[in-house]
């Protein structure tokens, strides 16, 4: 046994030293100032701290920090400070060492980054909030002081995703969901395009393994025909570039499995119907660095003489780079095979920034070790917006995460101020968003705007190239309706903060009115009684009920006393209308009580690592959520709600995405074990060119050939375009697939898809 243990330790040592040597080799090959000593010191410290600890996969724990440091060095291009922080990132969390110990040994900067990467205890949102949202908030708070915190966290997440196979399924869904919801958009926002794509693909692989495998197989089977198309398309381009004396490489870019699947879902198309799977990338080395933009356009002119270009698909990110630093010229050309192919033209510098993002900017500045300065305009402005959202804590963890999401996902437009200064704004933003982006005072007192010298309302959507002048009035105040038409995180956060501040006074007034009402009617005021009256008035939250009383939208009277005393009194006139929803609620309550008695209540002893199986016999014990309408055959998961009952969601459901991100410890792996005995609703939509007998043929396919019961049908026909929705009773997802495949064979039908 001792020999075996010794042998294992020797193998471990060999593995660890090999991984660390690889890290040192990658660092030595970089342009950073060589600080091998401090990296070696951090490695030895971390190795000693994690001694004897193993990951779930069985390998020594220290291999994880080395791998994170390797990604930070090789794939993100960070220097010694970041490499040390990556090596030490789990020391404070998992061992007895403190941040102070790290500071004493390695200095304040490394300690600050390690502290930002260490999970926290104690809450900003209060007891109801999730630890995940708390940790993410701390991460962003530290990030706004030093961007390296989030860059290393993304490296950490990438390695966790690469080694996710050793985790149980419920943990896989939680980590994959969180990655797709927050970390992939963050990587994209920081310009880490390669890492963003890998994070998306790995998340997709673990959440939808069958679809992932199917797309991989199809990509493999179409590889030869893609190569042929690429060779035929690029051959004349290569001749033209050689003739111009340009030093270049042409690369084949294949759409990622996640992007393909996403397009299939959103556009309701099959793999074969996606035309932009192949794109071409021309990466050239400019003769003169300062002339690289002109050289991009010269290449564009040359290739558009070979192929016809699509007039609406020229994307110029050369003169106005994306907010994450991305620069390139995109043009779509018609190939000789009759296929549109996108060509991306970029210099080697632009390509490196597109791959490595934020950190690559500094490779083209003087000096070795990256210095994080305040002069990176767009990025700094984005960090400032994040900081503003953090400075005004949201009461709800989900609201906070959604506010951050708004900032991560938007594509961009360029808008001009009255003085001609250019501002980057998210696509779909309004004049009011623009006002808040300049200053909170300007936003909160905004009465309208002049766009291109024409008067427009606050809700007017801006287009790229608009010149915007904001009009204000001191008598203007923030309106609750504004929240419905702003789209930026900053504007939403500021409006909510002002409304909350104004609302607190009204709520206090409303609560005092309610207490006085109880006192005047010789009744004891309790929070339960207040909630009972709120529900009676169809208001879900107590604070909203207080506000409604304060704003006199709810007038307390005799009917409220009857409700508290349990009397069901009918009256005439206006009062009767008030009682209709109440009587309906009582019936609904009975139905809910009946349904609730069947529902499974989770005990504390439940092993959350094991999957739950949904069968024909126990299906009534689970809550099937209307947000995504899951049916047998869908990729699903379970979520333990506040009543300890289990909700079933599709894994791709937007609500489930938020739950995975905020309440990951309540996620369960769920599997179907059904035997085609029960029926479920599924809606199929068809569109096509109308002709005599088309409806008859469609119903014939569904009812006679497939023997499927049509529940309801709705059809419209406008200018010979046929649009129909069929609600069917099916056993499972397989039934829906077979129906769709058969309907696609009907002559004249252009689109057939399932809708939620």
Image (spheres, helix red, strand yellow):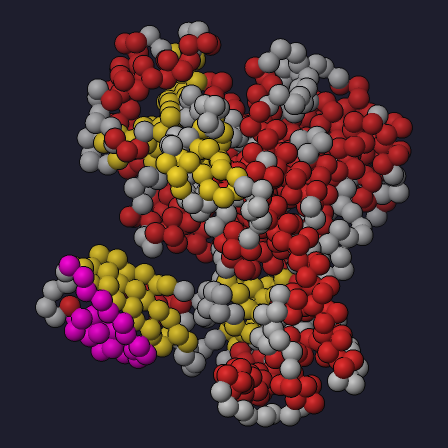
- Whether 234 is among the magenta residues is no
707 is within the stretch colored magenta: yes
Q: Position of residue 193 (x, y in %)?
A: 51, 33
Going by the image, does 725 lie left or right of 353? left
* Horizontal side of residue 108 vs 372, given as left or right: right
Q: Give the range drawn in magenta.
A: 695-719
- Image vertical order of residue 275 relative to residue 358, above or below: below
x and y, in percent, of residue 145 in the image: 71, 31
Say above or below: 398 vs 708: above
Q: Is residue 559 above or below residue 341?
A: below
Question: Looking at the image, how many numbered discs can be counted on the residues?
Answer: 0
- Which residue is the extreme one toward the front? 475
The structure residue drawn at horizontal position 55% and vertical position 68%, both measured from the top left corner, is 648
Q: In this view, does 146 lie to the left or right of 436?
A: right
Image quadrant assignment for residue 63: top right
Along the line of sight, the residue nearer the viewer: 682 or 734: 682
Front residue of 125 and 472: 472
Q: Residue 270 appears at what percent x and percent y? A: 32, 52
Front-lying residue, 39 or 286: 286
- Give the residue drawn at x 50%, y 83%: 574
Residue 294 image position (x, y, % from top left): 37, 13
Which residue sits at x=40%, y=15%? 293
- Could you tell me which quadrant the C terminus lies in? bottom left
Q: Determine the image quadrant of residue 364.
A: top right
Answer yes or no: is residue 602 visible: no
Judge from the rendering whether residue 346 lies leftward or rightward of residue 324; answer left or right: left
Q: Residue at x 22, y 74 (%)?
A: 699
**Residue 371 visible in rendering:** yes
């Amino acid at each position: 046994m001792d020999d075996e243990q010794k042998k294992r330790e020797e193998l471990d040592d060999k593995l660890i030293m090999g991984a660390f040597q690889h890290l040192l080799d990658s660092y030595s090959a970089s342009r950073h100032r060589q600080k091998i000593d401090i990296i070696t010191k951090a490695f030895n410290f971390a190795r000693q701290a994690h001694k004897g600890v193993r990951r779930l996969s069985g390998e020594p724990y220290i291999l994880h920090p080395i791998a994170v440091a390797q990604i930070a060095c090789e794939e993100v291009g960070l220097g010694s400070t970041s490499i040390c922080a990556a090596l030490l990132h789990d020391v404070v969390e998992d061992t007895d060492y403190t941040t102070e110990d790290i500071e004493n040994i390695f200095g304040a900067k490394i300690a600050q980054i390690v502290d930002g990467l260490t999970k926290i205890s104690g809450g900003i949102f209060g007891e109801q909030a999730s630890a995940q949202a708390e940790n993410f908030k701390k991460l962003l708070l530290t990030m706004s002081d030093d961007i390296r915190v989030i860059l290393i966290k993304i490296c950490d997440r990438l390695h966790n995703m690469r080694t996710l196979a050793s985790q149980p399924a419920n943990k896989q869904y939680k980590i994959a969901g969180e990655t797709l919801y927050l970390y992939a958009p963050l990587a994209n926002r920081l310009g880490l395009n390669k890492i963003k794509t890998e994070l998306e693909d790995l998340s997709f692989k673990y959440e939808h393994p069958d679809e992932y495998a199917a797309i991989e197989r199809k990509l493999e089977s179409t590889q030869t025909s893609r190569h042929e198309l690429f060779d035929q398309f690029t051959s004349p381009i290569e001749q033209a570039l050689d003739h111009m004396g340009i030093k270049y490489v042409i690369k084949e870019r294949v759409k990622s499995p996640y992007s393909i699947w996403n397009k299939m879902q959103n556009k309701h198309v099959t793999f074969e119907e996606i035309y932009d799977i192949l794109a071409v990338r021309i990466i050239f080395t400019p003769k003169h660095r300062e002339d690289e933009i002109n050289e991009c356009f010269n290449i564009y002119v040359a290739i558009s003489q070979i192929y016809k270009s699509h007039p609406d698909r020229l994307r110029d990110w050369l003169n106005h780079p994306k907010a994450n630093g991305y620069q390139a010229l995109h043009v779509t050309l018609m190939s000789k095979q009759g296929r549109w192919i996108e060509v991306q033209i970029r210099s080697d510098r632009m390509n490196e920034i597109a791959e490595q993002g934020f950190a690559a900017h500094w490779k083209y500045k003087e000096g070795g070790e990256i210095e994080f300065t305040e002069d990176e305009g767009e990025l700094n402005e984005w960090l400032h917006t994040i900081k503003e959202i953090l400075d005004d804590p949201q009461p709800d963890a989900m609201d906070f995460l959604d506010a951050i999401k708004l900032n991560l996902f938007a594509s961009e437009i360029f808008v001009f101020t009255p003085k001609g200064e250019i501002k980057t704004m998210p696509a779909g933003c309004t004049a009011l968003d623009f006002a808040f982006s300049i200053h909170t005072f300007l936003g909160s007192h905004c009465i309208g705007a002049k766009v291109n010298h024409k008067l427009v309302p606050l809700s007017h959507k801006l287009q790229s190239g608009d010149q915007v002048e904001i009009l204000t009035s001191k008598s203007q105040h923030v309106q609750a309706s504004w929240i419905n038409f702003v789209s930026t995180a900053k504007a939403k956060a500021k409006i909510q903060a002002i409304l909350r501040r104004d609302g607190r006074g009204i709520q206090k007034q409303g609560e005092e009115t309610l207490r006085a009402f109880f006192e005047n009617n010789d009744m004891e005021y309790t929070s339960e009684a207040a909630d009972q009256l709120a529900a009676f008035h169809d208001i879900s939250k107590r604070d909203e009920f207080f506000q409604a009383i304060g704003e006199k939208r709810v007038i307390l009277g005799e009917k409220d006393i009857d409700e508290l005393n349990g009397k069901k009194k009918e009256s005439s006139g206006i009062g009767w209308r008030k009682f209709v929803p109440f009587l309906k609620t009582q019936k609904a309550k009975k139905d809910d009580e009946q349904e609730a008695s069947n529902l499974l209540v989770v005990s504390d002893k439940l092993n959350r690592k094991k999957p739950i199986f949904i069968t024909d016999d126990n299906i009534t014990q689970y809550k099937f959520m209307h947000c995504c309408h899951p049916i047998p055959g869908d990729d699903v998961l379970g979520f333990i709600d506040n009543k300890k009952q289990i909700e079933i969601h599709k894994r791709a459901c937007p609500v489930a995405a938020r739950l995975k991100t905020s309440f990951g410890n309540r996620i369960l792996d769920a599997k179907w074990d059904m035997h085609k005995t029960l029926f479920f609703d599924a809606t199929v939509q068809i569109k096509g060119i109308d002709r005599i007998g088309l409806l008859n043929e469609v119903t014939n396919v569904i009812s006679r050939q497939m023997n499927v019961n049509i529940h309801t049908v709705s059809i419209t026909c406008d200018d010979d375009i046929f649009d129909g929705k069929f609600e069917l009773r099916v056993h499972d997802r397989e039934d829906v697939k077979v129906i769709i495949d058969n309907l696609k064979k009907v002559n004249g039908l252009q689109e057939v898809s399932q809708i939620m």
